[in-house]
């Protein structure tokens, strides 16, 4: 299927264009979902699409090392962008005891105690999600004694739903204080405690991420967006991605976000966003944090919302705001109506039950597509806009990143239900092939025959 063309026409060095790394041809390349706009070939150089059209017009782009791929009539679409699933929470689901802000102290202790058997072979018992005021009637000693009753032989760590506060037993306290003294740490923060105790099984997390890695490339998803996860789970997820990247086995791009479910001070938001961005600064082509996801609630004043929108606009961060009722929408209408229209383009508003006469409101996730074209557009062009990447991905266009999904059959001739079951035969990320069904199948047969006894 693949071949390298050697030689080619000698051109004036000052007039010639850059030679392509890869050229796809003899296919149906949909650059705008309309039959009249189908192209036959496209060229890729340095991760980006540099030409779209007919193969004969790309002769000057063919160099000694150009990879030519004959698509043999296959159908080419922009790589899909998944924005409706919470992959991080899915990966970490079995790594902690799930608490709820409405639980009282007794219910929390019963929940942890009831799951303690699950942690017999773990180095730590970890729970997340208690409310801001849950333990306000309990003294520090009472809390410590309660957690000591869960275990005196391993750390017990509880992190609040606000992701800023935590509680721990005596065993954990001793580890934290002794290590902080050795490392001469003066201020002990939650990130420090989490990095020290590592409250999850990383090998299991890595295994879970590897499953997502395989699933995404099979379905043609090139970017996975995640929202509404605690930042420390996000960091653990990224560490697993880094392992896959170092093994040259990462097969999707990850767009993370900072989840704000409280009216955090701007200083704190700056710190966390800066931390998340710095963590992945060396892998910008694969891991990014360019979205702030806000669960709007009564704590968040109009002044706070306005301040956050201003700051995110300054540093080019996209904002996604989930509204839960008409009151939330009214609050947003007041804030955004006072601003210039251009200032509000970075804001995406979700509400599953209410509409607004002044604002564009979309559902948190959509599964009621009338046809496959609508479904594909939702997962490509519109998805790119939702995560602030509309100038980079989501369409097949010159200058855009070469994230591509290729199918044997025409998805536009299928129903959405049929297309969901269809696998991509080739998936390309940043101009590199990360999935080739035929090659994978050939490799499997080679492994079988090479290991068979003679």
Image (spheres, helix red, strand yellow):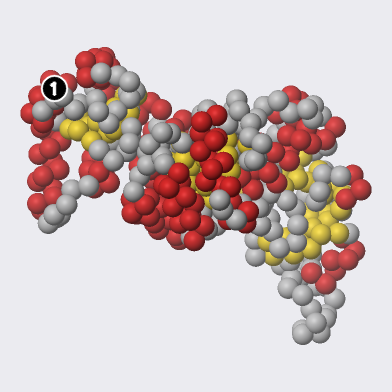
Taking depth in this image into account, of 42 and 84 the one nearest to the observer is 84
In terms of image quadrants, where is residue 48?
A: bottom right
| Residue 444 in sight in this render | no
Residue at 66 percent across and 36 percent down: it is 357
Residue 132 drawn at (x, y percent) = 27, 31
Taking depth in this image into account, of 311 and 443 the one nearest to the observer is 311
Taking depth in this image into account, of 51 and 443 the one nearest to the observer is 51
Q: Which residue is mark 1?
A: 146
Within 10 angstroms of label 1, few (less than 14), some, or many (20 or more) residues? Answer: some
Residue at 28 percent across and 41 percent down: it is 164
Residue 13 drawn at (x, y percent) = 77, 84
| Residue 359 in sight in this render | yes
Residue 158 drawn at (x, y percent) = 24, 31
Q: On the rendered structure, is 411 left or right of 366?
A: right
In terms of image quadrants, where is residue 137?
A: top left
Q: On the rendered structure, is 334 left or right of 268?
A: right
Taking depth in this image into account, of 116 and 68 the one nearest to the observer is 116
Q: On the rendered structure, is 439 left or right of 101?
A: right
Vertical comparison of 352 with 64: above or below: above
Quadrant of the image for the C terminus? top right
Residue 355 drawn at (x, y percent) = 64, 31
Numbered label tally: 1
SS class, disc 1: helix
Residue at 13 percent across and 54 percent down: it is 186
Residue at 79 percent across and 68 percent down: it is 62
């Amino acid at each position: 299927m693949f071949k390298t063309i050697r030689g080619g026409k000698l051109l004036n060095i000052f007039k010639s264009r850059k030679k392509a790394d890869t050229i796809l041809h003899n296919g149906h390349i949909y650059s705008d979902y309309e039959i009249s706009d189908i192209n036959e070939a496209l060229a890729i150089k340095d991760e980006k699409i540099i030409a779209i059209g007919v193969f004969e017009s790309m002769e000057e782009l063919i160099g000694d090392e150009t990879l030519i791929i004959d698509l043999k009539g296959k159908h080419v679409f922009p790589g899909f962008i998944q924005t409706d699933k919470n992959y991080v929470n899915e990966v970490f689901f079995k790594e902690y005891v799930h608490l709820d802000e409405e639980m009282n102290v007794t219910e929390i202790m019963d929940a942890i105690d009831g799951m303690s058997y699950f942690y017999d072979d773990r180095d730590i018992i970890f729970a997340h999600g208690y409310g801001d005021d849950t333990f306000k009637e309990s003294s520090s000693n009472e809390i410590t004694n309660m957690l000591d009753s869960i275990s005196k032989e391993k750390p017990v760590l509880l992190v609040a739903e606000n992701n800023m506060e935590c509680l721990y037993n005596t065993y954990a306290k001793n580890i934290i204080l002794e290590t902080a003294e050795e490392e001469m740490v003066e201020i002990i923060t939650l990130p420090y405690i989490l990095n020290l105790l590592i409250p999850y099984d990383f090998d299991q997390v890595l295994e879970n991420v590897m499953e997502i890695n395989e699933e995404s490339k099979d379905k043609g998803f090139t970017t996975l967006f995640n929202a509404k996860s605690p930042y420390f789970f996000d960091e653990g997820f990224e560490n697993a991605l880094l392992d896959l990247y170092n093994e040259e086995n990462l097969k999707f791009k990850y767009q993370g976000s900072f989840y704000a479910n409280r009216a955090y001070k701007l200083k704190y938001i700056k710190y966390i966003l800066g931390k998340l961005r710095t963590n992945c600064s060396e892998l910008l082509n694969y891991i990014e944090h360019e979205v702030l996801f806000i669960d709007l609630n009564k704590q968040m004043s109009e002044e706070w919302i306005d301040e956050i929108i201003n700051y995110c606009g300054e540093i080019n961060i996209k904002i996604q705001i989930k509204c839960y009722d008409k009151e939330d929408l009214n609050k947003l209408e007041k804030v955004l109506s006072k601003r210039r229209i251009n200032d509000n383009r970075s804001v995406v508003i979700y509400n599953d039950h209410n509409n607004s006469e002044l604002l564009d409101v979309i559902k948190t996730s959509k599964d009621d597509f009338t046809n496959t074209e609508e479904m594909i557009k939702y997962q490509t062009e519109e998805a790119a806009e939702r995560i602030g990447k509309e100038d980079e991905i989501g369409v097949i266009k010159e200058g855009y990143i070469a994230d591509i999904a290729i199918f044997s059959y025409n998805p536009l001739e299928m129903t959405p239900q049929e297309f969901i079951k269809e696998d991509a035969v080739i998936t390309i990320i940043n101009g590199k092939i990360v999935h080739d069904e035929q090659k994978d199948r050939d490799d499997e047969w080679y492994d079988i025959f090479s290991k068979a006894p003679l």
